[in-house]
Image (cartoon, rainbow, N blue to C red):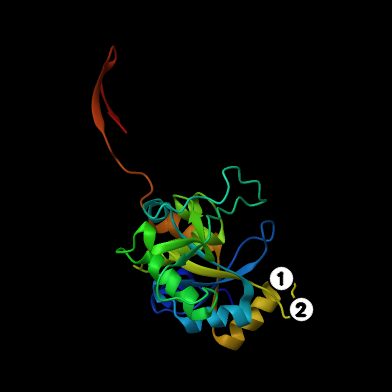
């Protein structure tokens, strides 16, 4: 299966389908199985556990994390790619031990529910939020920002669920293995590079915020900021 277009990926994300996001060869060189957080179910979490096999995380915008008082895990992030892990969380109600597929789906739903307050969550837990960089993939070309951007572009809550894809032997899946998975399960593959290009083409990135008259010895000019 060839690389899909960003509009195709947006449509699948909107429909609650998985999308595989890959980054550059000179970065992590990995594929993440992703889904819009708003579309999560126990079944989708279980699929990630069985067939992606990596760590299931909850990328989302910083504004919501601040509202729920979910801080970064460390103040000095020395990880290779500066992945912004926060403290882990769990829903306080309607969960058992927190690790089951149903429990993790419930925690995700609780975090993105606008009615949820800080004391509706316990810390630590079995769900790992990731703080997406403001500006999305235009600020950081990471899987975290990519799924949040795709969810936003799909008109959904700006949060996603992701899981690194590993082979059965525990090694990381590269593009040839990701293409096999894509074909077998009918999951589209998109690249972060294509998402960056899409946003540059379709979004207005410079906004006019102020205008002032600027008199000079050469005449009056209009300064625009």
Whether residue 140 is visible here, answered yes or no, is yes
Residue 116: % across, % down = 33, 63
Residue pushed farthest top?
217
Q: Are marks 1 and 2 in contact (CB under 8 Å)?
A: no
Q: Which residue is at the front of the view, 79 or 73?
A: 73
- Which residue is located at x 57 percent, y 78 percent? 48
Residue 167: % across, % down = 71, 77
**Secondary structure found at label 2:** loop
Q: Which residue is at the front of the view, 189 or 105?
A: 105
* Distance CA(mark 1)–CA(mark 2): 9 Å
Does 25 appear above or below 19? Answer: above
Residue 53: % across, % down = 64, 76
Image-quadrant location for residue 29: bottom right
Does 76 appear above or below 40? Answer: above
Q: Which residue is at the front of the view, 219 or 195?
A: 195
- Local packing at callout 2 (Cα closer than 10 Å; few below 14, some 14-19, many 20+) is few
| Disc marking residue 180 | none
Q: Which residue is mark 2?
A: 169
Residue 176: % across, % down = 70, 76
- Which residue is located at x 49 percent, y 84 percent? 43
- Quarter holding the N terminus is bottom right
Q: Which residue is at the front of the view, 114 or 59?
A: 114
Q: Is residue 222 left or right of residue 50?
A: left
Q: Which residue is mark 1?
A: 172
**Secondary structure found at label 1:** loop
Image-quadrant location for residue 57: bottom right
For marks 1 and 2, give the one nearer the viewer: 2
Does 33 appear above or below 185? Answer: above
- Which residue is located at x 60 percent, y 50 percent? 82
Whether residue 37 is visible here, answered yes or no, is no
- Quarter holding the C terminus is top left
């Amino acid at each position: 299966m060839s690389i899909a277009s960003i509009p195709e990926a947006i449509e699948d994300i909107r429909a609650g389908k998985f999308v595989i996001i890959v980054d550059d060869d000179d970065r992590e060189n990995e594929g993440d199985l992703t889904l819009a957080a708003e579309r999560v179910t126990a079944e989708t979490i279980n699929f990630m556990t069985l067939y992606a096999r990596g760590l299931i995380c909850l990328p989302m915008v910083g504004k919501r994390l601040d509202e729920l008082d979910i801080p970064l895990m460390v103040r000095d992030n020395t990880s290779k790619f500066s992945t912004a892990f926060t403290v882990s969380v769990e829903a306080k109600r309607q969960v058992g031990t927190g690790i089951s597929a149903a429990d993790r789906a419930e925690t995700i739903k609780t975090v993105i529910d606008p009615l949820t307050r800080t004391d509706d969550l316990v810390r630590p837990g079995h769900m790992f939020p990731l703080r997406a960089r403001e500006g999305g993939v235009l600020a950081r070309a990471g899987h975290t920002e990519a799924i949040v951007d795709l969810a936003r572009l799909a008109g959904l809550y700006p949060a996603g669920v992701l899981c690194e894809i590993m082979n059965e032997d525990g090694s990381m899946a590269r593009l040839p293995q990701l293409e096999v998975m894509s074909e077998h399960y009918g999951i589209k593959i998109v690249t972060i590079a294509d998402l960056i290009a899409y946003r540059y083409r379709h979004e207005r990135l410079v906004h006019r915020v102020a205008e002032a008259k600027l008199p000079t010895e050469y005449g009056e000019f209009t300064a625009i900021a």
